[in-house]
Amino acid sequence: METAISLTGVTKTFGRMVAVDNLDLAVPRGGLYGFIGPNGAGKTTSIRMIMSILFPDSGEISILGHPSAMDAKDRIGYLPEERGMYKKMKVQAFLGYVARLKGIDGTGLGQLISESLERVGLPGIERKRCDELSKGMSQKVQFIAATIHKPDLLILDEPFSGLDPVSLRMLRDLILEENARGATILFSTHVMPQAEEICEHVMMVYKGRKVLDEDLAAIRSHYDPRAIQFDPFDPHADTAALASLPQVERIQDKDGSCEILLKEGTDPSEAMRAILEAVPAARIEISRPRLEDVFIQLVADGTSADDEQRLRTEFRSAGGDGATV
Amino acid sequence: MKRILQIAVRDFTAVVVTKGFIIGLLAMPVIMTVLLILGPSIFNDDDFQIEGEYAVVDPTGQVFPEMDAALDGGTIAQRRSEEFQRVLEDAPEMVRALAASAIELERAMEEELGPTPNVRLNQLPPDTDVEAEKAWLNEETDGLRHTALIVIHDDAVEPAGAESEFGAYDLFVPPGLDDRDLDFIHANVREAIISARIARQSLERDTIESILRVPRPSSTTVSADAERRTVTEFSFILPMAFMMLMFVGIMTGGQYMLTSTIEEKSSRVVEVLLSAVSPMQLMAGKLLGSVGVSLVAMGLYLLMGLALLTSLSMFGLLNPWLIFYLLVFFLIGFFVVGSLMLAVGASVNEISEAQSLQMPLMLIVMLPLFLWPAISRNPNSLLATVVSFLPPINSFGMLLRMASTQPPPWWQIWLSIGVGVASVAGALWIASKVFRIGLLMHGKPPNLKTLIRWVRAA
């Protein structure tokens, strides 16, 4: 399969700190890939190397068939994590400037900008100064700046951070539209549910190293579904008794329903049969493994209980407002 | 190249079309013009009135009458008129034409020499107790202030012996007396003593003054194709004017470049730009845009200066090649200083942090301003020669020498240009390394040691 992004054995250090350690990545053309990991995992550094903003200490990079993104900058759209605009510039001038730098000719540029603004629900703001825009509006304008030249490859670094739920859904739809147009998309996030909602494939990094690189469907089938969601038919039924079943490790009550964690190596279908025999159910289903569980499971060896809790909190928060896609 | 030009055009227009730039650019010439027009009225001290009562002890009996005559209202008026005529003779044609009418002459004289002095003389007996009389100087008075006790020496008019020197006088004044009062007293006592001595010798003062007077003619500068009145001030001011033009040009563009880089970095827009262009393209575009800003500022001031020279019929005094070399040395100076300022801008997060890194650079660039008089008067001295080959100030140094009365040999000029071009390459190399790393660095600003490490590491 033809790859849009290929990293082979890429390492980057800052002083004594190894930000990216021997990283291999391959994103096929047309793919929608999530690059996930906690803050400080090396996502932004990797993306900056992909964009040729930083250069690796060792390893090889290939972008759209070129050894450097420099050779294909007109075909790449980039929304950096630290987004910015010229405060005093008008929206039209800012988008025009970025578009020209991306190789779009001046003819018809005004029309293109107006159409793009309309597409993201911001018609008529061409004459507004950038510092007059709200955060959500700025985010959309910056998304236009990254996509106005219809790139073949779109790289988005934490695109959802700090967005309200409405803007967040709109941005998700815009990303999916770009992917449907044929653009390869790589986006980074530390909020795992966002990745689960959008991506077809995820790459997890932790402390500069890749810990997972698989399709989402494969991850769900590979990772042992050891939890069962169970709602008793009789709300007053003694669910605690289920703990005595040989397949069950422990039970957690959650707002009237319970999560039953199975012992390692247990066959889930056999366990479900035993549970139904013990307590009639209104609902019983095997929990799909969440990415955060997979991640914690992958890095569990070097992680304390406190660290695990911190990571779980981080994975569920999107820029502090708790919103997810 | 297209992208470099796009960045240059944005940076250029972002500065040049702002009200702040236009106002700032025009502020200096406007302020200077206003000062030239209103300056004499605002700052002149010619309305200072010399007045007071002088007590004179004159044992010779010959000096006081001369002083009395000299300080008579009519005599003073005549002497002021003669003095003003002498001033007028040395003044430019335009000023002489202005002062042609009698009314204008009177007014001009008032402006030039100030109000007529109001002095009263009080002769004391030769045997006055000078020590006791000193108290008079500090007495309260309703009328004229007691401003001088003048004691003429016995031998002030005639020496005590054939081999002896002439005596002089002692002067006692109250506290807080203005130096212009003192100058007036000394000048008048001196004149009175000289007149008394001449009279004592039965000579004619007018004859002696006539013998001593040799008017200094204004010299004429003769060039191959024209002759013109020699203007010595021009050759003194020209080097400074050229250096200031260059300094203003470099600092205008350099400062805007520094602030715009800090703004792009702090607003995080720089990463958006770096997704479209390389750091080198960004740096080149910013340098080009800012050199345009500098050329606008410098060009405007240069045109104003040339227009002024033309209006004073002094344009011919300027060697046109100097303008060519001004441009060459400006470009060298700009790219050396400008690229280092760009590196400073990329290293810091806000303008206040830039000051500590910018200060050493500014001090070095300002060095030629302090050395101007020394280099201008002795353009081929060791100091001047060293400065004209020492980057990053060689551009300033060589331009100062070239605009002086003794320009350096051509090979030195071109050697200095060669040194300048090499220093441009060096500065661009250093700046590009710092620029690339610094742009994405946030947090604590780097110190000199860190900057050196960046240069080595990148």
Image (spheres, coloured by chain):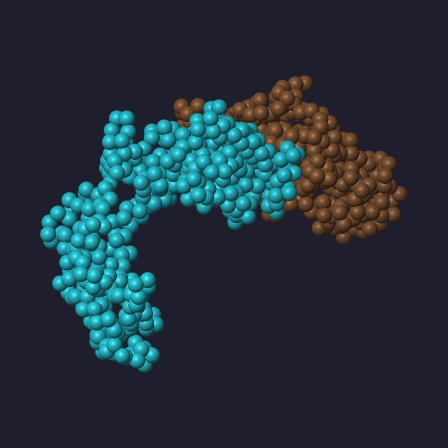
Chain colours: A brown, B cyan
Number of numbered tags placed on the structure image: 0
Identify the residue shown where x is 21% and y is 69%: B62
Q: Position of residue B200 (x, y in %)?
A: 20, 64
Q: Position of residue B436 (x, y in %)?
A: 58, 34
Q: Is residue B413 above or below residue B375?
A: above
Identify the residue shown where x is 25% and y is 49%: B37
Q: Position of residue A101 (x, y in %)?
A: 49, 28
**Quarter of the rendering containing residue B137:** bottom left
Q: Judge by depth and name the residue closer to the eye, A201 or B324.
A: B324
**Quarter of the rendering containing residue A206:** top right
**Quick check: A193 left or right of A79?**
right
* Image quarter (top left, top right, bottom left or bottom right) of the N terminus of chain A: top right
Q: Is residue A239 above or below residue B301?
A: below
Q: Judge by depth and name the residue closer to the eye, A290 or A144.
A: A144
Identify the residue shown where x is 20% and y is 54%: B208
Q: Is residue A40 visible?
A: yes
Q: Judge by depth and name the residue closer to the eye, B10 or B408.
A: B408
**Quick check: A288 left or right of A85?**
right
Q: Is residue B388 above or below residue A162?
A: above
Q: Judge by depth and name the residue closer to the eye, A79 or B68.
A: B68
In this view, the residue farthest toward the left is B102
**Quick check: B91 left or right of A241?**
left
**Quick check: A321 left or right of A277?**
left
In this view, the residue farthest toward the right is A246
Identify the residue shown where x is 59% and y is 36%: B434
Q: Is residue B394 visible?
A: no
